[in-house]
Amino acid sequence: MSHKPLGKVYLVGAGPGAPDLLTLRAARILASAEVVFHDALVHPDTLALAQRAEHVAVGKRCGRHSSAQAFINKRLVDAARKYAVVVRLKGGDPMLFGRAQEEIDALNGAGIEFEVVPGVTTALAAAAQIGTSLTRRGVSRNVTFVTPRVGKSEQPSDWARAVVAADTAVIYMGAGEAAEIRATLGARGVPMSTPVLLVENVSLPGSREIGCTLGEIEWAATQLGSGPCVIMLGEAMRDASIASYPQKQACWGTP
């Protein structure tokens, strides 16, 4: 009795949002996909590239119903036993805050072939959008990407240690934790005058940039909509943060 070979699972980075920031390899794989398990924030036009595929939403968004990671892992394994080309489509880059390692471990454990297709991570797209380098000679020689978010069963992480040690920090999934960010970094000695820039809906039409200082970050977070946001912090952000002050003054008054 012959057995159908196991399919291959592609962990594909969808980039920060704009469909035309997708890599050529990602677009090619989506065109041949038979099933796509996608994050909640993947742009509809990106999903439209997978014309032949079944689209399955498995996204996670803070405060909303989401699929458990173990369930996603199982669905990927099961799909690879049914389809030749399975895509797990993740916002940004799969290997940064995307829980890709858990899916890779599950696929390895089941003996299923996989490939990771990188995507543009939001921090780099945000830097490009605002025209400000995350590193700059004489100002910023290093950069760190962190998130204060942890799972329900996980121990708190010391994300602030990395921020304090870095010249430039980009905080993912942090807008809802603005009060904690201010208090934690302040307690570690980070000046309240440190420049901060919040960028919402990076790379998409209607993206917003709100400049402030660390001491004003809670106010800035209240000005955001419901879109995803990255927080960029450090001296390298000073000019970009100041440039967005007119928008801030219109809402709140002189800083």
Image (tube, grey):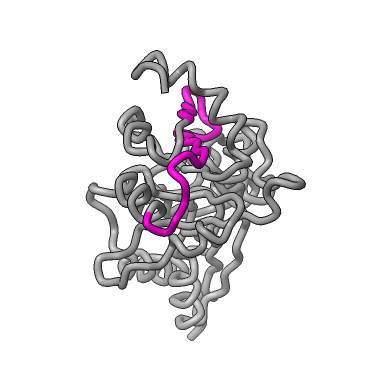
Q: Which residues are magenta?
A: 187-211
Labels in figure, total: 0
Q: Is residue 39 visible?
A: yes
Q: Position of residue 161 (x, y in %)?
A: 47, 64
Picture coordinates of residue 66, whole percent (x, y): 27, 54
Q: Residue at x 52, y 44 (%)?
A: 233
Residue at (31% x, 67% y) in the render: 71
Q: Quadrant of residue 153?
A: bottom left
* Image-based side of 235 in relation to 51, left or right: right
Asked where in the image residue 102 lies, by quadrant, the reply is bottom left
The spot of residue 52 in percent (x, y) is: 50, 45
Q: Does the segment drawn in magenta span residue 194?
A: yes
Single out the residue that lies furthest toward the right: 137
The residue nearer to you, when weighing 70 against 189, is 189
Q: Which image quadrant for residue 222?
A: top left
Position of residue 100 relative to residue 170, above or below, is: below
| Residue at 45 percent of width and 81 percent of height | 110
Q: Relative to 165, is 71 on the left or the right?
A: left
Residue positioned 34% across, 30% down in the render: 225
Please identify the residue farthest to the bottom as the structure is shown.
Answer: 1
Residue 103 vertical position relative to residue 124 in the rendered view, above or below: below
Comparing 3 with 137, the one in front is 137
Q: Is residue 57 above or below residue 155?
A: above
Q: Residue furthest top?
A: 250
Could you say which is closer to the camera, residue 84 or residue 218? 218
Q: Which quadrant of the figure contains the C terminus?
A: top left
Residue 87 visible in the displayed image: no
Q: Is residue 250 magenta?
A: no
Q: Position of residue 252 (x, y in %)?
A: 34, 19
